[in-house]
Amino acid sequence: NAGVMQNPRHLVRRRGQEARLRCSPMKGHSHVYWYRQLPEEGLKFMVYLQKENIIDESGMPKERFSAEFPKEGPSILRIQQVVRGDSAAYFCASSPRGGTNEKLFFGSGTQLSVL
Amino acid sequence: QQQVKQSPQSLIVQKGGISIINCAYENTAFDYFPWYQQFPGKGPALLIAIRPDVSEKKEGRFTISFNKSAKQFSLHIMDSQPGDSATYFCATRGTSGSRLTFGEGTQLTVNP
């Protein structure tokens, strides 16, 4: 049973370009969470999605960032017009259902570097 | 507003010693307190978790102690091994949602 798969593992973008990060949850999981980790810091919540729905986006920056989790295919975190401050590790986690009793399983992350 | 404060930021322990990492939270509506372990280049992995209806939970060499009145919980690693060297994160989750709020992390180094 494959775990949470994220790709690419490393992504290099120049300022002003777009970054698209993909996350395939564990089999049978329909809930996805995105977290950002800056160097030497903890994980900061960004967004929580269920298939075709955004449940909680309170941690998402108001501009340039968007996320989706379509009925078919992986969840996508999209960053438009990247800036150097966007350089970080982006982690995706999944759970079978939402709610307070669910364990979160994390992927290995995508390291985004903005030149 | 930081809701989970973790200390120390870094910790060095000799092999066989006890590693202790502490977390304090502010929101009394939290009802789930996990600890995650993260190795370089990897995502966090759930290590052990506790709910506020118990004061202690032990799994092998790992123990969580929970003090509800003080709003604090800690991770104890007994007989620490070099393979335990990693970053450890405490986290909390509220009663009304499923997202986790993480502490800032503790870099643990266990010397041989």
Image (cartoon, coloured by chain):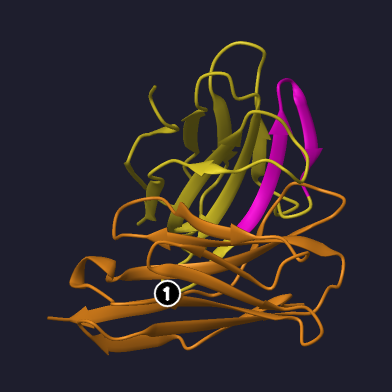
Chain colours: A yellow, B orange
Residue A59, picture quadrant = bottom right
Tell me where residue A39 sits by quadrant: bottom left
Q: Which quadrant: the C terminus of chain A?
A: bottom left
Identify the residue at horizontal 75%, vertical 52% (top origin): A62
| Quadrant assignment, res B4 | bottom right
Which is more toward the observer, B105 or B28? Answer: B28
Q: Which residues are magenta?
A: A44-57
Q: Up-down: is A75 above or below A44?
A: above
Horizontally, residue A41 falls left or right of residue A11, namely right
Q: Is residue A90 or residue B70 the one in the foreground?
A: B70
Q: Characterize the magenta stretch by its predominant secondary structure.
A: strand
Q: Nearer the viewer, residue B31 or B8?
A: B31
**Rendered position, A29 above or below B27:** above
Residue B69 located left or right of residue B75: right
Residue that carries the numbered disc 1 in the rendered image:
A40
Where is the N terminus of chain A found, in terms of image quarters?
top left
Q: Is residue A114 left or right of residue B64?
A: left
Furthest residue in direction left, as rendered: B112
Mark 1 belongs to chain: A
Seen from the viewer's position, the closer of residues A50 and B86 is B86
Q: Position of residue B78 (x, y in %)?
A: 36, 77
